[in-house]
Amino acid sequence: MSSKSRMKLWMIRITTSVLIWICLVQLTILGETWGPRVLKGWPPCLSHESAAVLAVKSSSEVPARALPPKRVYRNNGYLMVSCNGGLNQMRSAICDMVAIARYLNVTLIVPELDKTSFWADPSEFQDIFDVDHFIMSLRDEVRILKELPPRLKRRVELGVTHAMAPISWSDISYYHNQILPLIQQYKVVRLNRTDARLANNGQPMEIQKLRCRVNFGALKFTPQIEELGRKVVRILRQEGPYMVLHLRYEMDMLAFSGCTQGCKQEEVEELTRMRYAYPWWKEKIINSDLKRRDGLCPLTLEETALTLRALDIDPSIQVYIAAGEIYGGERRMASLAAAYPNLVRKETLLEPSELRFFQNHSSQMAALDYLVSLESDIFVPTYDGNMAKVVEGHRRYLGYKKTILLDRKHLVDLIDQHNAGSLTWDEFSTAVKEAHAERMGNPTKRLVILDRPKEEDYFYSNPWECLEPSYEDEL
């Protein structure tokens, strides 16, 4: 009898365990449905006062935005991209690659960022951009993965893949006719140069709008960068309006461009040595004076100060310097500081501890400058580099915020005439204002130059197809 009792007891235990396990599985599957209903039936464990506080808090919370539904399509393969250049060069390239992946019905692998350029920034995509937001916000357009599936990842590690640099300024049909067959053949293709690989104009409207959607919506910076950017803006706003001056007067810019106006002879020699040290900087022999007269050099600090004064920019305004280390240091900054004494930088507004994790990460530093530039009352770039162009376009998207687009070729001619005594100050100031009356970020269409895409207006500086009200509607 004792043996039978023990057997019966064990059977009851086993049966009970199975039933409990089945119940747990069912609750896990149906938890989202049944959970709230079960909880509603439980007796309250809070006081009426606590419940009222929670009710107010719940009603004030913004509901989470629903994710877009996944787009279902037959996957033609996998596209890997290795971006090159600085932050904003890579930013526009990422927008292009998303549009291309969508058009080809392939899966995009989260882009790799440049770590071998002059800046040697080791940042990964997720160190700068909110990678989960990037993937989820675009899932109704294209499938994006953080890495290849294991089998294909192993093939890439073994070198069994195809890598290439697509042709610059290509039409979307080039990718359909030339790149898609390679993806279908090799399953995985890596594009190892991505800057300016999609044409500015002549693309389907849905392609242009997707480029904008990525740029203005999907490419959010990390929460840490966003919060620090907001802090800088708050500090500036406490003192009143501010202007962002995007100076391109760093050593690498001057060496690359060959622009040496106002530099000492030893500085000219140092810049020349640097230009020859980088083999991918193809232009070596450069006539600085000729290039300046053609408007192809960034304005010097002295030229910038004269221009801002001529435009009647309030000398008491806060001027946030969005730039790296200025070549020539205090000597070159002196004239600008004399004309506009309220010069600030992120390094002077934030504690060293707040920037500690950004040191030696030029792209993360540039991301802070980008956010502060977007929010400024006036944005003035002294050279039309990638940041100047992308910020210009983003400010147009935000409501055509004031962006002074300097006509450098005209300006240096006027400045030379003024310095030579041919123009009085009043004549010089009037001429500068007249030259820039329609260069304040006003609604306009891009300049199109057939067969010379490098000379025409950049898509990201004026994505008029995406702006409201559309410029096309005003014609």
Image: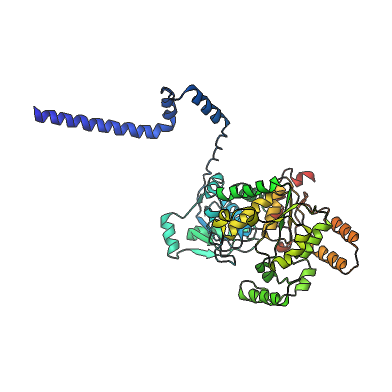
Above or below: residue 302 compared with residue 470: below
Residue 180, located in which quarter of the rendered image?
Answer: bottom right
Q: Residue 226 placed where, x, y %?
A: 59, 48
Estimate the x, y position of residue 77 in percent, counting from the top left. 50, 55
Quarter of the image holding residue 323? bottom right
Q: Residue at x 84, y 58 (%)?
A: 310
* Viewer-side residue, 17 vs 297: 297
Q: Nearer the viewer, residue 150 or 72?
A: 150
Left or right for 243, reference 231: right
**Left-right relation of 308 to 94:** right
Residue 271: x and y in percent read 67, 74
Q: Is residue 5 visible?
A: yes
Residue 452's spot in the image, x, y percent? 72, 64
Outermost left residue? 1
Q: Is residue 165 left or right of residue 439?
A: left
Query: Which is nearer the eye, 346 or 78?
Result: 346
Which of the pair 241/414 is nearer the observer?
241
Q: Colour scheme in the image? A: rainbow
206 over 36 or under it: above or below = below
- Badge count: 0
Q: Quadrant of the N terminus?
A: top left
Quadrant assignment, res 9: top left
Can I make out residue 175 in this image? no
Residue sitting at 56 percent across and 33 percent down?
61
